[in-house]
Image (spheres, rainbow, N blue to C red):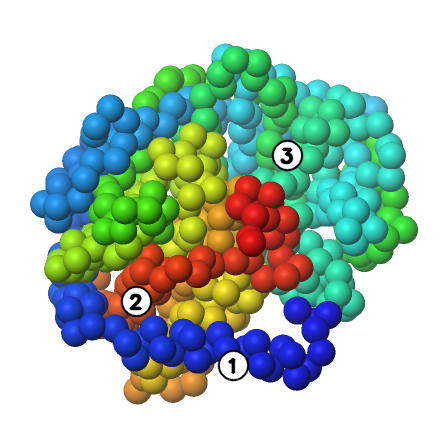
Amino acid sequence: MNRWNGSAYLLFSMVLVISACSLVGGRSQEVRDAAASIQGADLAEHVRNLSDDEMEGRGPGSHGEEMAIAYIADHFRKAGLLPAGDDGTFFQEVPLVGITASSNMTLTLRRGDASLPLKYGEDFIAVTRRVERRVGAVGDLLFVGYGTQAPEYNWNDYKGVDVQGMVLVMLVNDPPLEDETLFKGRAMTYYGRWTYKYEQARKMGADGVILIHEDEAAGYPWGTVENSWSGEQFHLRPSGKAKRELRMESWVTYDAAARIFEMAGLDLEEQKKAAVSRSFRPVPLGLRAHTTITNSFRNVDSKNVLGLLEGSDPVLKDEYVIYMAHWDHLGKNPALEGEDKIFNGAYDNATGTAGLFELADAFAGLPTSPKRSVLFLAVTAEEQGLLGSKHYAENPIFPLADTVAVINMDGLNVWGRTKDMVVVGLGNSDLDDDLRAITAEQDREIVPDSEPEKGFFYRSDQFSFAKKGVPSLYADPGINFIGRPEGWGMEQREKYTAENYHEPSDEYDPSWDLTGAAEDLQALFFLGFDVAQRDRVPVWSDGNEFKMIRDRSRPIA
């Protein structure tokens, strides 16, 4: 958009706002009544049920999954949605393999006769995606900075070095650069995600990765790494010619990493500073890593749950708006210390799943469906790397070229009404302009994510669709709470991350105030309804990394 002159851009913005406002002001009373039916009390009941101990933390492949997906399908059925899964059911099978690595492992670094053994859990966590009983990882350590190859930024941490068979040591997130034209400034790019770093190391031929964890740069404490990556890990089940996987994907604490660099005769802080430069070159550490990962594994047929509201227009009903939330959480871990061994996942993401129910009920209550069809998609295994949404995006029930928008919910507001609503990745598409007009009618505003460095857009399920080109929106709770002092909202978010994120303590709290969640859902209802009703379809903004993919799959006349 910055290629346009100022007056042209201003005129275009005014047209968008006027168009969106006309939609807002022109809604029928029936549509407004449907939105008003979304209430906090109904949300609370579903959150309480989905996060009850009886659901056993909704782990994929568990009895908790069976209970959770039956609960979701039953609600879709009662709402009058059509089954939209495999073979006329509400379910799409997602073939997973569950791999559990024994905690009785060590990671040992050696230099000549000297050795540095690291303790599992305390110093490091390691897993492998290889479906093998015993996987050994032995390789020379090479520090590759941030492990990034980004040609559009003229950035290459590998510099053509052959890393075949090596164990690569990397820093988390993107390089913290003062030049905000590189790597989106404070906002994390996909290059900063651990998923990218492992994928790139695999493509380069490495045998393993040691990722140096830092709480602030990662956006969560070491306990989150330990809880998320110990116990059973799920992956999409290999089929046909499986790709070569790393022998070891591991994390180490910053203190453990400092000891590794000290053993190599280097200072970690100095090496971090050197890595924040295009001229950085990989640094051999002169150490050799040794570990053996002993696995047990099982095949699991997990499930996405899909309910469809068929559109009313004979032509446009073959196009789709998707509302999505992930139903899964971390299950239970019998080896966990303390009495509470169930990860209930009340906020993450029983709230989002409950929001899916409320939206389904609101749409089903309309006297006439919108022109386009609306799909309500509850996906599995988000906590394992967006696996359920990835599987749908690669095996869509309805063509992605005919899917005009995805609206994702991952953690709703549980602290009361706000004057704002956060859009993660604000400016990605013109869905933001539509939502801006809707929240304005509520005397509210949309604001960008206040923690862009944590890369939330790449950490939730809409990313699976964005990578395929589908315009996607991920809204988060606002932070400017009505009747609360400035900064209170950020305090609640930070407290949740520090104390409850991926912890057994993420449980339903009767004192939660879900009125703000209901108001956010009403805005998302109007957004989805408008997109499903009008002729114009959402588009990515100029310069967005997903726009070219969409333009190829669905050219705009």
Q: Which marked residue is nearer to the observer: mark 2 or mark 3?
A: 2
Judge whether 99 appears above or below 347 on screen: above
Q: Earlier in the sequence, mark 3 or mark 1?
A: 1
Where is mark 3, residue-wise? 199
Can residue 306 be seen by looking at this rendering?
yes
Q: Quadrant of the C terminus?
A: bottom right
Distance from label 3 to label 1 (Cα)?
42 Å
Q: In whole angstroms, how far apart are the C-alphas of marks 2 and 1?
A: 20 Å
Label 3: state its secondary structure. Answer: helix
**Residue 356 location in percent, x, y?**
26, 53
Tell me the kind of residue under disc 2. Phe
Q: Label 2 to label 3, Cα distance in Å?
A: 38 Å
What residue is disc 2 on? 526
Given the image, on which type of amino acid does mark 1 rest? Met
Q: Earlier in the sequence, mark 2 or mark 3?
A: 3
Looking at the image, residue 209 sits to the left or right of residue 400; the answer is right
The number of numbered discs placed on residues in the rendered structure image is 3
Residue closest to the eye, 340 or 129: 129
**Marks 2 and 3 in Cβ contact (< 8 Å):** no
Identified at 43% across, 30% down, the residue is: 395
Left or right: 125 with respect to 400?
right
Q: Amino acid at mark 3?
A: Glu
- What is the number of the mark on residue 14? 1
